[in-house]
Amino acid sequence: MDIFQTIGEISGKAYNSYLQAAKENGAKIAGYFCQVPVEVIHAAGLIPYRMRAVGSSGTAKGDIYYSPLNCTFTRHCFDRAFRGGFDFLDAVIFMNGCDHTRRMYDNWRHARKTQNISPDFLYMFVTPHIVDEYSMDRYIEEIRKFSKCLSERFGTNITNDLLLNSIKLFNKQRRLITKIYEKRKSMEATVKGSDILSMMFAVTAMPVDTANDLLEKIDASISDNPVPEKADIRVLITGGCIEEIDIIRIIEGCHAVVVADNLCVGARYFDMEVDESGDPAESLAKRYLNKLSCPRILNAFDARMKHIYDTIRDYRIDAVITQKLKFCDLWGVENLMLKKESQRTGFPLLALERELYGEGIGQLKTRIQAFIEEVHNRKNCPGFFS
Amino acid sequence: MIFAGCDIGSLTGKAVLIKDNRIISTQIIRVLSDPVRTAKVLMDATLEKAGLAYDSITRCCTTGYGRENIPFSNMNISEISCHGMGAHWLDNSIRTILDIGAEDSKIILIDEKGRVIDFAMNDKCAAGTGRCLDKLSKAINLRIEDIGGVSLKSRNPVNMTNVCSIYMELEVIRHLYEKTKIKDIAYGIHDAVASRIAYLAKSVKIEREITMTGGVSRNKGMIRSLGKILNVRFKQLSVEPQLAGAVGAAIFAMKEESNG
């Protein structure tokens, strides 16, 4: 089986054969939201598992706790928790990424007490919203508290050596992903964005050493041959939560190829390595607070915009597509600022708003196709419409 | 050479045949159970009208929600590009197109060659669409075909403040209970729907050379309300404006043929 078919199968499910094998060998799994330092989870002997709502059958049960004005990511995720979709987890680590996900900690604890939903270890990792020396101290303190709590609960004393070992493994993963992303700079696209997103979902849902082996195989499998589909327009996709690979497929079905991203489970996941020479907790704090951020970090729009402009230049981007879920205020404001920036400097931008696993694919496709046609008009690709 | 444009929308299917830069046949039908069947019945009728068969079509381009997987189609292009190109071919002075269909409304800006340079499309709300107008027509017991004409008899529109189509309907019912004249309610409905479209228009810079396409362009009451609210005068196209998307599709087919 083609390696991208394999990762496609892994990413299409919440629980995969790698997790199952690890679990059968006695491993424990900790689900986490947003950008929690995975190295600490790993050093505690658990497998970090990026929480997704994949496989969700709806939001009916999630809606018992949430209102229709909460984003569909939280409603789908919580619904899955109610239906036993996360029963394979031994812990869930929440983060104050936004108020919707933060509230899930309260809701999950309540449902745990009243309805006994799994797992029993629930932890809120508090991350500052600004980056300065005080927040750095606060973050270091939070890492130490988190380490202590995991050590006590799961019986592994998290030493500096264990943390350093985990840092090295995840740094290796970052280097491997960076190497694959670098290949996407080639003017002839050799790998599709839909396959890359699939890869990212897979490697954040399996043991890190297995993921690193897989990444090496993926790297070796990417040939110099261009993708068979016509791909005249090079797209950068940015924005908030996205799980539907089909949206990338729609873009790539319109004579375009997604060659770069600024997504939670994309560039924001692997940007910047952790310093392996200093105190591990301090190095982790430096990395997690200074890496490419999402709009939950205040006063950092210019840094995020610089990343967009650098990507446009390095990956020779023709068009930028940003997307957000309904009721996500953080990305609502960010996209407005992005639109103003696009008007100021002239890069083509399409802003999409949608529901996670929602309907309305027809409208979405019309909008994407018309946008790609508009960019084509600017670029004037011959034979584009045939 | 004969070029076909086929626009399969959510409520109607439209087709056009162009030969020697001239429209030789057009057809509009209500959509059937699936897009492929609609396209087949539509194109059968369009060809029959012109006394032609499928093998006489040099190239066919499809557009609209049902644009994909049509067996006789050679290419598909979004309805946004097609309405832009169609309106441009019919009147090359046009720079803005207001395309209001059954399910969505779009504002399309085009350049001097009919190419899309910007567009806005409803995504949060359907209160500025034909479907909303249809629902509100039914609330005052009028057919969608008649509500425009009735509204034109009024000079005193009721003021409708709600922006949601469901609440608009409640407001209409309240006016009915208060025995407000139907023509004034009809005028108010047009203003309310037009104000939702005007809200969408704020996101792009509309140009004065503007026309309306899509099914709602047949409603003269909407043309009055939109003209008033947007402070524009719509240019009339030389064919049924609902056909603009299909015309644009046929033009794209023609261009593709000449590009080889």
Image (tube, coloured by chain):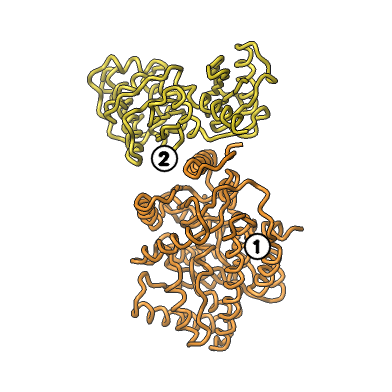
Chain colours: A orange, B yellow
Q: Secondary structure at mark 2?
A: strand
On the rendered image, what quadrant is the C terminus of chain A found in?
top right
Q: Nearer the viewer, residue B188 or A331?
A: A331
Q: Is residue A299 left or right of residue B70?
A: left
Q: Residues within 10 Å of mark 2 (few under 14, many from 20)?
A: many
Q: Nearer the viewer, residue B182 or B154?
A: B154
Amino acid found under the numbered disc labelled 1 = Tyr
Whether residue B201 is situated above or below residue A10 in the rendered picture: above
Q: Secondary structure at mark 1?
A: loop
**Residue under circle 2?**
B118
Counting from the top left corner in percent of width and height, residue A66 is at 44, 55
The part of the image, by quadrant, that contains residue B33 is top right
Q: Is residue B216 left or right of residue A181?
A: left
Residues under numbered marks 1 and 2 in contact, where contact means CB atoms less than 8 Å apart: no
- State whether discs 1 and 2 lie on one chain: no
Quote the CA–CA distance across marks 1 and 2. 43 Å
Q: Residues within 10 Å of mark 1 (few under 14, many from 20)?
A: many
Q: Which label was assigned to residue A15?
A: 1
Whether residue A118 is situated above or below residue B190 in the rendered picture: below
Which chain is mark 2 on?
B
Amino acid found under the numbered disc labelled 2 = Asp
Whether residue A220 is situated above or below residue B4 in the rendered picture: below
Q: Name the mark nearer the viewer: 1 or 2.
A: 2
Which chain is mark 1 on?
A
**Residue A99 visible within the image:** yes
Q: Is residue B89 left or right of residue A131?
A: right
Residue drawn where x is 53% and y is 69% of the image: A270
The part of the image, by quadrant, that contains residue A167 is bottom right
Q: Which label was assigned to residue B258?
A: none
Whether residue B167 is situated above or below residue A349 in the rendered picture: above
**Residue A74 visible within the image:** no
Counting from the top left corner in percent of width and height, residue A47 is at 61, 73
